Image: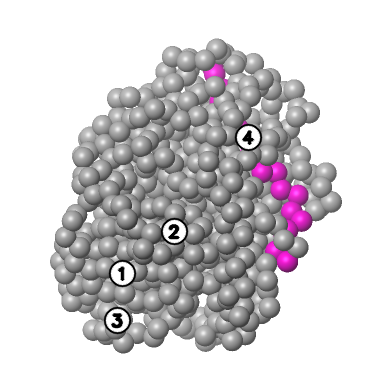
Amino acid sequence: MKFKIFSILSVVLCCFLAATATLIESDGFSELESLKLNFIEPLPKLIESSTITRYYNLELKVVKLSPDGYERPVWTANGQFPAPLIQANKGDRLVINVTNNFGEGTAIHWHGIFQRESNWYDGVPGQTQCPIPDGVSFIYNYALDQSGTYWYHSHFMTQYVDGFVGPLIILDPDDPYKNSYQEDYVVLISDWYHSLSSLLLAQRLAPHYLGFSPYPDSVLISGLGQYNCSSPAAGENCNPNVPLPAYNVQKGKKYRFRIINTSALALSTFSIDNHPLSVIEVDGIPVKRAKAVNILQIHVAQRYSVILTANQPVANYYIRASIIDTCLLPRTTETINYNSSINYNATGILHYYGAESNKPTSTPYPVTMQSCGDLDPSVIRPYNNCPAPTNVTNEFVFNITFDRSENDIGILGINFSTYIPTFDNPTNQRIIGKENYKDFEKDQNAFGYDIPYGCVQITVLNNLIVNHPFHLHGHTFWLVASGPGPFLSNITTYNLENPVIRDTTNILPGSHIVIRYLADNPGVWAFHCHIEWHVSSGLVAQLIERPSEFSNQTLPEDVRALCSRYKKQKRLATLPRNSMVKRVHMYRKVK
């Protein structure tokens, strides 16, 4: 009965969410006439003419920071938030030494990287590795056979919500747009929470909880935002003078901006006043230049590259990243942090060389997006014509479902099966150990296929009340169908000629998508909603690709050793800490 009531509510709220998206306007610092700026450096030029091995060191530690003025512990790499830029050329090898001093386990997912023949470095605890225990160093070592805009983040519980995110940029000497701009900038946009994600998740997965996902407190551009420090919730240590992120441009030049949405929950819009943006890349895939957009709508985990032409009068112009309130579920009083004093808008500055340091007078573009979906497909057609495969060899249908556990915990799942990670027994090690995925526990949500270079088709049906941006590990996919209606009977048209190709796409409430990809990468690959609260509620599938072949691969000894060290720390009760124990136990109560 509870699920039926939820379904009825979904019909009502889908009508609410289908309304035209609206933006709550604020520049965040209307009283300031002069600006305090934090200038963001453009990407450095890589001068090597041949492929090389690049080495990086990341020390993971918790540091008190005030990204939007509000002070809180932040999970950082090398004390930095966002984490340091990792940059390479296509064909390079990355060797990244990670030392975990978080006080709890961790693992790093290299979002969008295919990890061919290195599945164990995909960074998903319980699927491709055991967590890196506290106080332990581990090396990720993999080759790059792709290029574009990517990012890295913790895939351990909700840890990336606390700050552990960073950009990963792979340059290509054959990039079709390499001569179309003079400088290259990276912009991370994100929602932001003032409470620790472990506390928020414990509340979200508490028995009898009837609210929605925790409501954020702020929006950030490249790790900086403007919280209202006069709010009663601001506390004594709130800094009202956080500098604005600023990007220098020279009049007459062109610039590439790589925009990455690293949020936990929210669709964001991105715009730069008076400067239309020409999209040239989507999730690592070059696209044909079409009509420039004034406002870019970007879901969680998606990436876009755009070209900006600095052709306006020399001045300062607002850069705007905004959460669209009507694309989130209503702030019911049952929802965690429903009374948030959120500033829905973060602002930065596009600073022309020669301009004064005064407040911009530019005005925002009107918001014209008619839904909370992805960017118009006509703007992001692949640069190279690449029709979708037509001979489907394996087909799956995933219904996104909501239910309540025996303990009355609200859970999500695939076909009413809620994924529960087994951190100390990763799936890929089970496959290499000759286990049959068909014998796995139901809560592993394991789906397999074993035809080399076959075409896999996945249909996802969303009959719930909220957006679900789904990400596929280890692949990009052809988006061959999408539209209203959460039933197979609603799927009547397929675009096999020139579909969008990407690795993350949104599924609107009461709608569907159909994706296809080639089984060209043996391993264990996650397919999940990238809203972090939904991942932690079980909305995850595991795709076991070509297990007959993958089971013959050799697991590196240092990867296997992680599991023995992780199990040992658990026995000694030093990992994870109490808050993490509560998080893990929440999963176990779902069963």
At 49% from the left edge and 44% from the top edge, which residue is drawn?
Answer: 298
List the residue tagged with mark 1: 396
Q: Nearer the viewer, mark 2 or mark 3?
A: 2
Q: Amino acid at mark 2?
A: Gly
Q: CA distance from mark 2 to mark 4?
A: 36 Å
At 53% from the left edge and 72% from the top edge, which residue is drawn?
Answer: 402
List the residue tagged with mark 3: 437
User: How far across and down, in percent of the image, does residue 542 sit?
Assistant: 36, 71
Comes first in the chain, label 2 or label 4: 4
**Is residue 134 placed above or below 192 in the rendered structure?**
below
Q: Which mark is residue 485?
A: 2
Q: CA distance from mark 4 to mark 1?
A: 42 Å
Whether residue 206 appears in this view of the structure is yes
Q: Secondary structure at mark 3?
A: helix
User: How far across and down, in percent of the image, does residue 552 sit?
Assistant: 18, 76
Q: Secondary structure at mark 4?
A: strand
Q: Specify start and end residues of the magenta stretch as a single range.
A: 334-353
Which is more toward the observer, 427 or 561?
A: 427
User: Which quadrant of the figure has residue 201?
Assistant: bottom right
**Taken as a whole, is the magenta stretch helix, strand or loop?**
loop
Q: Amino acid at mark 4?
A: Thr
List the residue tagged with mark 4: 347
Q: CA distance from mark 1 to mark 3?
A: 16 Å
Comes first in the chain, label 2 or label 3: 3
Q: Nearer the viewer, mark 1 or mark 3?
A: 1
Q: Nearer the viewer, mark 4 or mark 1?
A: 1
Whether residue 159 appears in this view of the structure is no
Q: CA distance from mark 4 to mark 3?
A: 48 Å
2 and 1 marks in contact (CB < 8 Å) = no
